[in-house]
């Protein structure tokens, strides 16, 4: 009879997790700006947001997430790339997207609005080269989902000058490492619009290519139903990848992995009932040298992992938890509810007293969408 009791208990825990009963379990202290904190009016954060029915914008905010300026977008946006050397940023349309919009984040002036070709679409993310001269965007061929990295010349008004391909189908996010290597979260899913067509044969990968398109390294997860989507790195050599699980809805595998080029992928750890809280989807990831934070708008929560141990140290509720960035020793997390949480990193994890703590946040009146980017 004992296995039946255990199974029933686990199902109860999974149900409770899905209903939102998430609590902090260890590891960070919160330090947030109060509502009366005046904006410094210095651009620090940029993210896409919703304004209302069929109205979308990209928002430039200060370090607390309070808006400085808001620019309208032609359709719903997704990720944002930032070029601090030129004061530029690019908002990318949500997949299958039809545009990218480059603008000056200091004055809000639009620099370029690029429409996708009829046989192409944008996947919602991109990144600048480290010298700020080039923009790399994840794109796809509409009929096949063949993965493409579009290369745009910033100095020529964001003219498209090249396409890098040959790494798989359905790329989502691309990031750049300090040595200029491009890392791509290849989802492996062929879609018609947003409808998946090949879930039984999908081949996701974490792929490394040179700026010229040479395939340098490629790694798959053990479960091919884990579509690799969102990425971050710790400022040095470690890449974090967040997954969307496309398998049995009753299974709850790890949705986060760590990788250093030349080594094996390392799955981060949480209990199945904790992974259930993320509702099979990781949106944004932020990483420091000690901690990893990931959000799930579908699960209305965020989690924090120890980079050293790979263990989950905190799981906290946040309605429509969306963007996440790390700057210095501080994590900032946005939400579709308008709240912004700021967490200072605690090096003395062993001295933490596990308890539910008061949570303070800034209310920004912005309905933040999935991602945030920080101006370095």
Image (spheres, rainbow, N blue to C red):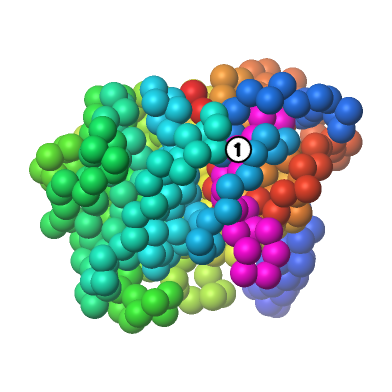
Side of 263 relative to 80 (left or right): left
In the picture shown, does residue 266 fall above or below 320? above
Seen from the viewer's position, the closer of residues 32 and 366 is: 366
Side of 125 relative to 5 (left or right): left
Magenta part of the protein: which range?
47-64
Give the percent coordinates (x, y) of residue 253: 49, 60
Query: Which secondary structure dominates the residues rendered in magenta?
Result: strand
Instruction: Specify the quadrant of the image occupied by residue 129.
Output: top left
In the picture shown, does residue 131 fall above or below 166? above
Side of 243 relative to 214 (left or right): right
Q: Residue at x 51, y 64 (%)?
A: 75
Q: Is residue 169 visible?
A: no
Give the percent coordinates (x, y) of residue 225: 38, 68
Seen from the viewer's position, the closer of residues 277 and 349 is: 277
Give the percent coordinates (x, y) of residue 85: 39, 22
Query: Is disc 1 placed on a helix, strand or loop?
Result: strand
In the picture shown, does residue 106 fall above or below 280? above
Q: Residue at x 19, y 42 (%)?
A: 209
Give the percent coordinates (x, y) of residue 341: 73, 38
Instruction: Specify the quadrant of the image occupied by residue 117.
Output: bottom left
**Residue identified by numbered label 1:** 60
Query: What quarter of the picture does the N terminus occupy?
Result: bottom right
Side of 129 relative to 124 (left or right): left
Instruction: Specify the quadrant of the image occupied by residue 171.
Output: bottom left
Q: Residue at x 60, y 28 (%)?
A: 43
């Amino acid at each position: 009879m004992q296995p039946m009791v255990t199974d029933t208990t686990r199902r109860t825990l999974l149900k409770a997790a899905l209903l939102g009963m998430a609590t902090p379990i260890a590891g960070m202290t919160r330090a947030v700006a109060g509502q009366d904190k005046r904006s410094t009016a210095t651009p620090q954060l940029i993210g896409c947001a919703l304004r209302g029915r069929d109205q979308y914008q990209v928002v430039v905010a200060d370090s607390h997430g309070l808006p400085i300026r808001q620019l309208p977008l032609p359709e719903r946006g997704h990720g944002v790339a930032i070029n601090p050397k030129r004061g530029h940023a690019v908002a990318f349309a949500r997949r299958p997207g039809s545009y990218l919009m480059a603008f000056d984040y200091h004055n809000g002036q639009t620099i370029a609005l690029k429409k996708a070709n009829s046989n192409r679409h944008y996947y919602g993310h991109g990144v600048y080269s480290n010298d700020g001269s080039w923009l790399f965007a994840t794109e796809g061929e509409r009929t096949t989902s063949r993965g493409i990295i579009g290369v745009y010349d910033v100095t020529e008004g964001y003219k498209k000058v090249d396409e890098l391909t040959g790494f798989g189908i359905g790329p989502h996010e691309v990031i750049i490492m300090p040595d200029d290597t491009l890392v791509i979260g290849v989802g492996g899913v062929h879609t018609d619009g947003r409808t998946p067509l090949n879930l039984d044969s999908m081949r996701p990968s974490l792929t490394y290519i040179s700026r010229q398109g040479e395939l340098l390294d490629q790694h798959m997860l053990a479960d091919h139903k884990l579509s690799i989507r969102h990425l971050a790195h710790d400022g040095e050599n470690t890449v974090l990848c967040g997954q969307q699980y496309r398998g049995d809805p009753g299974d709850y595998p790890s949705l986060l992995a760590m990788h250093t080029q030349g080594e094996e992928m390392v799955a981060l750890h949480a209990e199945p009932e904790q992974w259930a809280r993320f509702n099979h989807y990781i949106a944004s990831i932020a990483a420091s040298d000690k901690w990893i934070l990931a959000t799930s708008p579908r699960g209305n929560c965020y989690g924090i992992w120890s980079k050293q141990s790979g263990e989950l140290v905190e799981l906290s509720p946040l309605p429509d938890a969306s963007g996440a960035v790390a700057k210095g020793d501080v994590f900032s997390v946005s939400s579709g509810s308008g709240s912004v949480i700021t967490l200072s990193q605690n090096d003395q994890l062993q001295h933490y007293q596990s308890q539910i703590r008061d949570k303070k946040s800034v209310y920004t009146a912005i309905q933040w969408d999935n991602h945030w980017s920080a101006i370095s």
